[in-house]
Image (cartoon, rainbow, N blue to C red):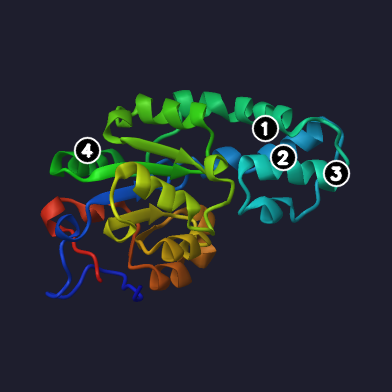
Amino acid sequence: MQRGTSAFTGPGAGSLLARYRAAIFDLDGTLADSMHAWDHICRDWLSARGISAEDRLEQDIEKMTVTQSAEYVISSYGITIDPLQIQAEWEAMVLRQYAQTLPLKDGAAELVNAFTAAGLRLAIATSCFPAACEAILARHHIRDCFSVVMYTDEVGRDKTFPDLYLACARRLEVSPGSCVVFEDFPPALSGVRAAGMAMVAVHDDHAAGQWDQFKQAANHAIHSFRELLPLQGIEIKA
């Protein structure tokens, strides 16, 4: 995979619709403006039990799935609660926001609908939990655009590995090389590369400190999905 640039450039760049048969979207921080909903879930949960979290808690669990984070809390803080119960309590703390208030990123619904109309196969690849994912996609009327929705817990490894992306490609019945991934999480680049897919880096404030390096490493980088509309203007650097 070659390094990208910060703009769609060059007459030799193939159109996205011609080059790719499928698009795989992350949810939190990519399609949905939802990262802030998770900012202090673990810390607040510990505080409610009279436990002071370490300053680096959020950094320690950044790359983990929800299940892995629960297991980390158990081992690090000597908690004897079942990890599934912890996970359920965390999910209940944020579910209402997904179902009622959290917005999509600017232009996300329009691009997803345009891709669907153009015949691209679409998937969600997320570390979120099913109830929240289904709720926000349904509330914004784009759930039917995705024929595949997969979760990191289903494959057992996080997004720094290719498993989730390869599983999406299998279920979409396309080759990995015909997929482009939209993702805001810089560490996921290693998983996307290992899967043999292209990546569009999507800006999110939660990863702003890594943005310059992230956008240079990805095939392309955007601040808003509106940069990709109308579809005939979309080109991805090979």
What's the residue at 25%, 71% (across, down)? 238
Which residue type carries mark 1?
Gln
- Tag 2's secondary structure? helix
Which residue type carries mark 2?
Ala
The image shows residue 195 at horizontal and vertical percentages of 42, 61
Return the residue at label 1: 87
Compared to residue 232, the image places residue 117 above or below, namely: above
Cα distance, mark 4 to mark 2?
A: 35 Å
Return the residue at label 3: 77
- Tag 1's secondary structure? helix
Question: Depth check: 155 or 69 in front?
Answer: 155
Residue 113 has which mark? 4
Which residue type carries mark 3?
Tyr
What's the residue at 43%, 28% (across, down)? 134
Q: Is residue 138 left or right of residue 205?
A: left
* Nearer-N-terminus badge (4/1): 1
Circles 4, 1 touching at the beta carbon (< 8 Å): no
